[in-house]
Amino acid sequence: MHLRHIRFKDAENGKTLVFLANNFTLPAARICALYKSRWQVELFFKWIKQHLRIKRFFGTSENAAKSQIRTAVSVYVLVAIVKKRLNLDASLYTLLQILSVTLFEKMPLQQAFPGSEYISPGAVPCNQLNLFTI
């Protein structure tokens, strides 16, 4: 099989990149742009793996993957909002770890995070019914 050897000098960092392609009809600049776009996609999925904690996709369809990514991004943004509103010093990764461990714990949210100075309101009357009293 014949391959096309394309050399590209990156003006931003001064590196010379070499690409191999089997398409002989596209101009060299277009092939370099395609590789650059592909690299952006690779960086996007690397960010997803590192920050959104998606280890694998549960579905195989495009809709399933998009739904899972949207859900993970929504959780990430909500945790970022909580971090900002509570003025927490911990990183988003740490907050996600804490929330995954304390997800089903019954405690005030501020008490779950390290370094937060949560003061219990004491015996404040509550209008909520307790389902487990006999």
Image: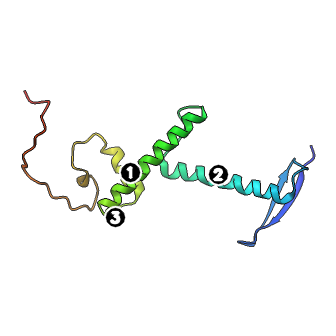
First in residue order: circle 3 vs circle 1: 1
Which residue is at 38% across, 50% downward? Answer: 97
Is the residue marked by circle 2 packed among few (<14), some (14-19), or many (20+) residues within 10 Å? few
Q: Which amino acid lies under the numbered mark 1 shown in the image of this protein? A: Leu
Is the residue marked by circle 3 packed among few (<14), some (14-19), or many (20+) residues within 10 Å? some
Is the residue marked by circle 1 packed among few (<14), some (14-19), or many (20+) residues within 10 Å? few
Quadrant housing residue 102: top left
Q: Position of residue 95 (x, y in %)?
A: 36, 54
Q: Is residue 59 left or right of residue 118?
A: right
Query: Which mark identifies residue 61?
Result: none
Mark 2–mark 1 Cα distance, whole angstroms, equals 25 Å
Report the colour scheme.
rainbow
Which residue is at 42% across, 55% downward? Answer: 93
Q: Secondary structure at mark 2?
A: helix
Residue that lies at the very extreme toward the top in this rendered image: 134
Q: Which residue is mark 1?
A: 78
Q: Which amino acid lies under the numbered mark 2 shown in the image of this protein? A: Glu
Q: Is residue 53 above or below residue 16?
A: above
Q: Position of residue 59 (x, y in %)?
A: 55, 31
Q: Position of residue 54 (x, y in %)?
A: 51, 43
- Kindly report which numbered mark, 2 or 1, lies closer to the viewer in this rendering: 1
Q: Which residue is mark 2?
A: 42
Q: Which residue is mark 3?
A: 89
Q: Secondary structure at mark 1?
A: helix
